[in-house]
Amino acid sequence: MKNDQAASVPLAVDRRRLFLGFSGLAAAVAWPKPASAKPEHGAAAAIPVTHYRTATVDGIKIFYREAGPKGAPVVLLLHGFPTSSHMFRNLIPALADRYHVIAPDYPGYGQSDMPDRDKFAYTFDRYGELVDGLLGQLGVTRYAMYVMDYGAPVGWRLALKHPERISGLIVQNGNAYDEGLKEFWDPIKAYWSDHSEAHRKALYVLVAPETTKFQYTDGMSDLSRIAPDNWVQDQALLDRPGNAEIQMDLFYDYRTNLPLYPKVQAYFRQHQPPTLIVWGKNDKIFPADGAHPYKRDLPEVEFHLIDTGHFALEDKADEMVPLIRDFLGRKVA
């Protein structure tokens, strides 16, 4: 905004633009206006408020972000490695005018508890149980899921346990097919083969600062869109004493997801959940080879390969948010 124009703009509008600039979505998405809002001429529409809460599930404190009307359709956001619900900080307010949005952190990530490994099993089965327990405490019995990276195996466990509860799927670089595990996974597969200390130590590079930054920058269309705060924050949490060993445990446990793939694919075929794929096609961790097979089991899937990398929302929210809102509006709302 030019200085000579600033004085003529209502203060509420000016503050709204400032907020949108900080959020990273100013140029990406026209901010949604709640249906019930009737602002006076020139006033800003209400901006959804995100709440930061903690619930105790099976003795573990689970942190989660929550926004939107309590009676609205629920959208569950399940994060990937090595981040947390922080990855959804911009998506949440972009959906919360019409949806009740819930985004938890798994134990060992974000602001949730990080119990000792000798007292807590860091497995995808356990993560699925805890997220299911959180939803039970919140009284959520029907929801759409956004699954990304580690969020996919967590979400698939929920879908297999409660297929009737899933109103729709948004899949962003989340695997359900053997074709999606390419060269990046070879050292991890070697660890699966023998659970040796040598192969475990070879994986420590995956929690090193250069790898964390790589996940946010590789394959991105415009690096000026990617906030360095992302990898700085994630690395600080990875560097907590004991966290690297937690990540090694999860790399090993990821092998348990592969035997579930046929069951997940059968779930797709039987239940045909409405599904939107918004996949960063330049991702080396979960490449587009893993996106195409969804078409075999979900012939009505809405399929979009986007010119970006692993953390697609950091780069392409301007493309993804309209697709997600349109999908949810037609299939879930």
Image (cartoon, rainbow, N blue to C red):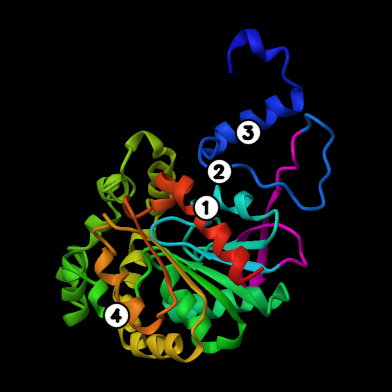
Residue topped by disc 3: 19
Amino acid type indicated by mark 2: Val
- Seen at 34% across and 85% down, the residue is 261
Is residue 161 left or right of 315 when viewed as pictured? right
Residue 255, numbered label:
4
Q: Residues within 10 Å of mark 1 (few under 14, many from 20)?
A: many
Query: Which one is in front in this view, the residue at disc 1 or the one at disc 3?
Result: 1
SS under mark 3: helix
Separation of residues labelled 2 and 4 (CA atoms): 38 Å
Mark closer to the chain start, 1 or 2: 2
Q: Secondary structure at mark 2?
A: loop
Query: Which of 71/111 is in front?
Result: 71
**Residue occupied by mark 2:** 29
Eye-nearest disc, 2 or 4: 2
Comes first in the chain, label 3 or label 4: 3
284 with respect to 60 (left or right): left
10 Å neighbourhood of mark 3: few (<14), some, or many (≥20)?
Answer: some
Q: Does the CB distance between marks 2 and 4 fall below 8 Å?
A: no
Alpha-carbon neighbours of circle 4 within 10 Å: few (<14), some, or many (≥20)?
A: some
Write down the region rendered in magenta: 44-72
Q: Does residue 318 show up?
A: yes
Using the numbered discs, state the Cα–Cα distance from disc 4 to disc 1 in whole angstroms: 32 Å
